[in-house]
Image: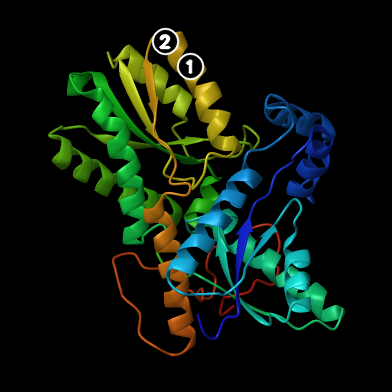
Amino acid sequence: MEPYDAILLVSFGGPEAPDEVMPFLRRVTAGRGIPDERLAEVGEHYYHFGGRSPINDQNRALLVALRAELDARGEDVPVLWGNRNSAPFITDALRDGYAAGLRRVVAVTTSAYSSYSSCRQYRENLAAAVAELAEEGIEVAVDKIGPYAPRPGFGAANLERLLESMRALDGAPDEEIALLFVTHSIPTAMDETSGPGDGDGDLYQRQHLALASSLTEESNRRLGRDLTGELVFCSRSGPPSQPWLEPDVNDRIEELARDGVRTVVLAPIGFVSDHMEVVYDLDTEAAETAEKVGVRLVRVPTVGTLPTFVRDLVDAVEERAAEARGEAVPDFPGRMPAVCAPGCCPNLRAARPALCGRD
């Protein structure tokens, strides 16, 4: 792991009690002028589960899994945890690490793809934390692994989950099965500007489509099927006047039912764990839609703490350390640099400093 003396797991965060829901949502939407009345509507998703998001417990499980994998490799580097929008916050995690003698940290986010919301916003949060600590006289260096959706290990972990679920469909004819790969919708303008500033844009969507295509091809080959996979979206939250990526998963389920589909397989490749967008938007809303139109819904688990996924995350950290030492690292199709190119996934609302980039 040299030159790093700690790993920082960085996640979105979530409330753990009903009285934390509204403060959490206000932090998430700070600066956007969203009234409390609208936030209260979103808050009902959390109150539906007792006011507790599953994400923090899933991060705790991932921390345990990372620790076990590091121990198996003989790596005694500490693993810290900081959230963007709820305790433990990034700044506090870095401050505590500094007090324990940790000076150079490599960050691993729980978001795998390239876009403003799934990469650069995390880099902005890291920059803000480092700047706040600098004002306290605390100097901490933070690097970050690159977006890992294109990594072969991430694909292998998603394939493992998909095959587990698809094997339960023995006997169902192909023409009655639809395979939907699900991710979080984002504004089309954010997708169009995702990726390096001098690139083709749409990298967020292209990364998903590449993974969905490879998973469809390989699962068909292994199971002797001939299914066509589609990419669909969930969790739209913008105003109706703002274009977001479509089709919505619920709309597509209804359309498929009208076309004679009897089983819909939902593979949430856009998420690494079963947090709120999965347990509410898919396991609750999409499940209700499927029941309404008479479709059997098979929900593929997220990669979570699957050993294949955890090993790949640690591989990514070791490769980032090798890069920091000036060593060559393995290449693969779609590999993203750990240091982002100028203009990569810009903030379309305001220009803010971001770590781990050349801009």
Left or right relative to 167: residue 112? right
Q: Tell me the residue at 16%/35% (across/down).
A: 223
> Looking at the image, is 128 positioned above or below residue 13?
below
Check disc 2 and report the residue beneath it.
293
Left or right relative to 258: residue 170? left
* Residue 235 marker: none
**Amino acid marked by disc 1:** Thr
Residue 326 image position (x, y, % from top left)? 43, 90
Task: Tell me the CA gap for discs 1 and 2.
Answer: 6 Å
Say whether residue 85 is visible: yes
Q: Residues within 10 Å of mark 1 (few under 14, many from 20)?
A: some
Residue 144 image position (x, y, % from top left)? 55, 71
Q: Tell me the residue at 75%/69% (across/down).
A: 129
User: Circle 2 — which element?
Assistant: helix
Say whether residue 236 is visible: no
- Residue closest to the far right: 136
Quarter where residue 309 is shown: bottom left
Check disc 1 and report the residue beneath it.
289
**Amino acid marked by disc 2:** Val
Identify the coloring. Answer: rainbow
Q: Tell me the residue at 27%/45% (across/down).
A: 215
Q: Is the C-beta separation of discs 1 and 2 under 8 Å?
A: yes
Q: Residues within 10 Å of mark 2 (few under 14, many from 20)?
A: some
Left or right relative to 196: residue 335? left
The front one of 94 and 115 is 94
Q: Tell me the residue at 40%/61% (across/down).
A: 311
> Looking at the image, is 113 positioned above or below residue 128?
above
Residue 143 image position (x, y, % from top left)? 58, 76
> Looking at the image, is 247 positioned above or below residue 136?
above
Residue 355 image position (x, y, % from top left)? 63, 74
Quarter where residue 174 is shown: top left
